[in-house]
Amino acid sequence: MISFDNKQFVISTDKTSYVFELLNTGHLRHLYYGNKDDVSFIKPGWDIGDTIAYDDNKKLFLESELLEVSTCGKGDIKEPFIELINPDGSLTSDFLYKSHSVDKCEIKLHNLPSPHGECEHLCIELKDYHFEIYLYLHFYVYEKEDVICRNAVLVNREKEDIVLQKLMSLQLDFENDDMIFTCFRGSWANEMHKTSSIINQIKLVNSSNVGSSSSRANPFVMISSKDANEDNGDVYGFNLVYSGNHYEAVDTIIQNRSRFVSGINPDRFEFEIKNKESFESPIAVMTYSDKGFNGMSSNMHDFINRHIVRGKYQYNRRPILINTWEAFYFDIEERKLLELARKAKDLGIELFVLDDGWFGGRNDATSSLGDWTCDKNKIPGGLRKLNEDIDMNFGIWVEPEMVNTDSDLYRKHPEWCVEYDHHSEGRNQRYLDLSNDELVDYLIEIMSSVFEESGCTYVKWDLNRIMSDLYSKKNKRQMEFVHRYYLGFYRLCETLNKRFPDILFEGCSGGGNRFDLGILCYFPQIWASDNTDAEVRRRMLYSYSYGYPVSCIGSHVSACPNHQTGRTFPLGYRYEVAKFGCLGYELDLNKLSEEELNMVKEQIKDFKENRDVLMYGRFYRTDEKHFKVSDGNKEISFDYNLINE
């Protein structure tokens, strides 16, 4: 519910309240965000020594205030919400209240993914004091999930161009009493290490500038009270519906006054906005619970399942799959594929996934990316015939955003490639320039032909390197490149989703290099990591579960010794970890003993009996080695000590 009375805006969900007030100057002062039954307003700011007074009245000192939007040049020296270059070259902004409106709607951004489903909506119009530049703050309220989403839109009504250098999606100012900032850091095959720091007179930053949301720094972060645990204490959770470079920062300059912001990373970012043009920031998601980390996670899980994931597989059972990658790698042979498929079907597996190596002249990672035609030397009858002969649901691996220089596509269209002189290579491949509309149109058609030809019901969509040597040959404003790339990427995903509503897409980016809510708007599940070691995956599951439901986490039983770590774990333990996710097997079943095959058959039977609870029950953590899922009637637990006795 949204109300405005006595210059106070009150946004209420089932269990929380978010309150701010309109000052006589036109600024928006933040007052409270927390439990709706325990509202206590924050005290106004004050004058401290050399602090800048906003105007001649000398009653407002923005540096010490808690605000809904922060600008540059008027005395607020904490992390700014917006930075821009005005038509006259000046850098000062002063956005003040002009009007507001309240309605019910479903979020519809012009070029970016967004949550679905009706919500209550507050729009506040702010105008710059000096220029015809308008800033619209949007609040979207999902009452049952205790979630509030935010974003901002900047509109230029000046005749001259302006240059946007930074526009956040969310700002939350709060009183800080040694609270904790938690983010999830990592690298390839080593994703999601939970990292916590005390917020105390310093600036803490979690960000990505590698061209994706990144395994280095997931966009999901938390702020919690010092005494918070899994079941008690104040916990705030934040995430961004965006797959590109992101930025989350907590800035504390004045004691007990902190600011959190989340949005597109301003590092190497600028966007030119012409007369009557606008720029919209991605949707940011925030939630609060006084029931500890489990309470906050429950809010996030419900919101993602109900309002981020969509389409046929929003609540449908995800199929148990066998993937060919760790079984055969590039050594694809039709005979071996059919043999593996027969064995898998006998065990009760439901989906056969043909991974890398099926197209062009692809025998290793050095060639053929971009040449999306079936290699008839490996699969003589083609993809459709293979699908029919396998006699299971059929899935296929693609990496549409990439190209090898040793490919027909590169030789024909080098101008479609993101590259610069003396290019720094990653995995022998380069990005295609998705900021180029002509290329996106081509990818839509070539992927459509692959999906139609194969008759697939599942697509594993990979992206195996980060960005380097950023240079678009089509769009010359290079500081806009990464964001424009994702506008093209989202158009590609949106179109293919609409054309193929029955396909289950799984996002993959060398594992978890692009594990975010933007991807989940199009791909209902994501491959969590290329590291399938059971112990590593247990830790990752624990970390991912803070912000993401298990229904969106790809999780496989793989071979031992493990192909990434060389460690060996019992087959039963590998399953006990993998079943808390979208279950698959990634090994050569023909190399298993009869005893192991019988174990796999029992595992698959167990998973089918418990799949609904495991996928969509309520997930609870006790600690990294103990967690459970429950639907109210059935409870399934993971106890590290019992499993490993």
Image (spheres, grey):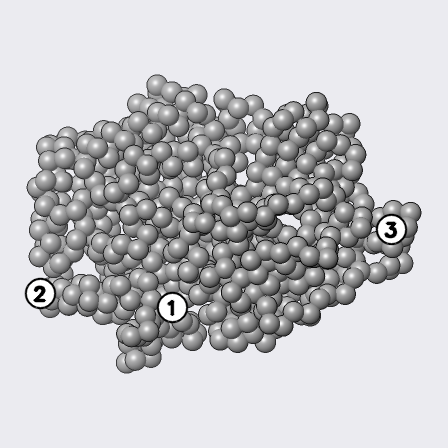
Residue sticking out furthest to the top: 412
Q: Considering only order in the chain, which callout, 3 or 2, is on the residue closer to the N terminus?
A: 3
Q: Are marks 2 and 3 in contact (CB under 8 Å)?
A: no
Q: Which residue is mark 3?
A: 53
Q: Quadrant of the C terminus?
A: bottom left
Q: Considering only order in the chain, which callout, 3 or 1, is on the residue closer to the N terminus?
A: 3
Can you give x and y, in whole percent of width and height, for residue 52 in the image?
Answer: 86, 50
Could you say which disc has been placed on residue 594 in the image? 2
Establish if 266 lies above or below 251: above
- Nearest the viewer among 223 and 160 is 160
Could you say which disc has been placed on residue 569 in the image? none
Q: Amino acid at mark 1?
A: Phe
Q: Amino acid at mark 3?
A: Ala
- Quick one: label 2, few (<14), some, or many (20+) residues within 10 Å? few
- Distance between the alpha carbons at the discs numbered 1 and 3: 50 Å
Q: Amino acid at mark 2?
A: Glu
- Nearest the viewer among 99 and 520 is 99
Q: Secondary structure at mark 1?
A: strand
- Distance between the alpha carbons at the discs numbered 2 and 3: 79 Å
Establish if 468 lies above or below 37: above
- Nearest the viewer among 395 and 140 is 140
Q: Quadrant of the N terminus?
A: bottom right
Residue in view at x 60 percent, y 28 percent: 277
Q: Secondary structure at mark 2?
A: helix
- Distance between the alpha carbons at the discs numbered 2 and 1: 34 Å
Residue in view at x 21 percent, y 33 percent: 452
